Image: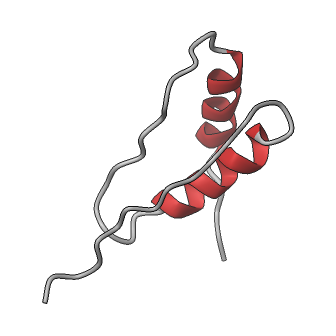
Amino acid sequence: MICISEDWGGLAAALLESDLSESVYIVGATDTGKTTLCRHLLGKAAAETRTACVDCERGSPG
């Protein structure tokens, strides 16, 4: 089950309301929900602005 934090809705709204035309970078440790957060933000933003997601996770060392 995926739990969407109430904070995510506020983050999406703040990004859409901003006048900035900048990139947003989501960084964090492995398995902390970065991809889920990105998918949520993309879903909210796609109807109103151009969006893209680049996943640069390098995987486990080995």
Residue 15 versus residue 46 in the image, above or below: above
The quadrant of the rendering that contains the N terminus is: bottom right
Position of 56 with respect to 38 (left or right) is left
Position of 53 with respect to 46 (left or right) is left
Residue 51 versus residue 29 in the image, above or below: above
Q: Residue at x 42, y 40 (%)?
A: 25
Residue 7 locus on image (x, y percent): 59, 38
Position of 21 with respect to 43 (left or right) is left
Residue 20 locus on image (x, y percent): 57, 14
Name the image colouring: secondary structure
Residue 21 versus residue 39 in the image, above or below: above
The quadrant of the rendering that contains the C terminus is: bottom left
Q: Residue furthest bottom?
A: 62
Q: Residue at x 50, y 56 (%)?
A: 54
Residue 12 locus on image (x, y percent): 66, 34
Camera-side residue of 54 and 29:
54
The total of numbered circles placed on residues is: 0
Q: Residue furthest right?
A: 47
Residue 29 locus on image (x, y percent): 28, 62
- Quadrant of the rendered structure where residue 51 is? top right
